[in-house]
Amino acid sequence: MINFRKIFIFLVSINIITLIWWLILIFNTFPKKYYFSDSVSDKYNSAIIVLTGGKGRIQKGIDLYKNNHGSFLFISGVFRESELEIKQQIERQVLNHNCCVIYDKNATSTFENAFEVKNWLFENPEIENLILVSSYYHLPRGYIIFNNIVEKKIFLSPAEDNIQIDSNLFFHIKLIFLEYFKVIYTIISLI
């Protein structure tokens, strides 16, 4: 006979444990060993990958590129603003944009971002490191997906240098919980 009460308690316990893990992970802003630092990057073997869709991500990628942290700037995903505006912004800030800035307009999800980058890496086998740029709450899921699809060393760089959770606590809590369920779904779909 199946004891539904025990199954329910088990499932609730698992959810509570994983939620606590997620909160520790996200508020620790993902383990620092994955984070990009100036000593990690080798410009000639690195590419900066920007996952669009959040505030400040493209600018963070441009800043890293201008500071010679990567030989390529790969901007992946659906642009919220007009594509022309973004290209003009990048062209104003990046001198050698014709050779080293790659735009991917096809990806509509993080999985598709990873596959687009993987396809691009086949043409650029010299790239050994990826610097993944996204929002702080998206980086853990982005890392999980890219680590399973792209066989390169991955470093993380949050778009927000100083995360101001106090500014709108409810908004950040909503994002964190939404990402929690997306991470659970991602892990299950990668099994």
Image (cartoon, rainbow, N blue to C red):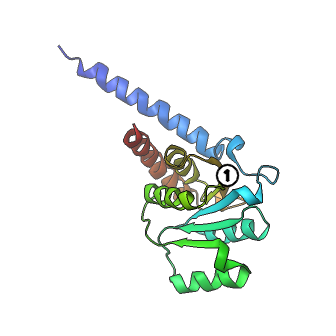
Q: Amino acid at mark 1?
A: Asn
**Relative to 142, 163 lies left or right:** right
Q: Secondary structure at mark 1?
A: strand
Front residue (pair 46, 181):
46
Hey, which residue is sitting farthest top in the picture? 1
Q: Residue at x 54, y 86 (%)?
A: 84
Front residue (pair 27, 186):
186
Pointer 1 residue: 129
Q: Residue at x 73, y 65 (%)?
A: 64
Which percent across, then down, holds residue 8? 31, 26
Which percent across, then down, holds residue 133? 63, 60
75 w.r.t. 21: above or below: below
Which percent across, then down, holds residue 171? 53, 59
**Relative to 111, 162 lies left or right:** right
Tell me the quadrant of the picture where the C terminus can be found.
top left
Tell me the quadrant of the picture where the N terminus can be found.
top left
Q: Residue at x 42, y 27 (%)?
A: 13
The answer to whether residue 163 shows anywhere in this view is: no
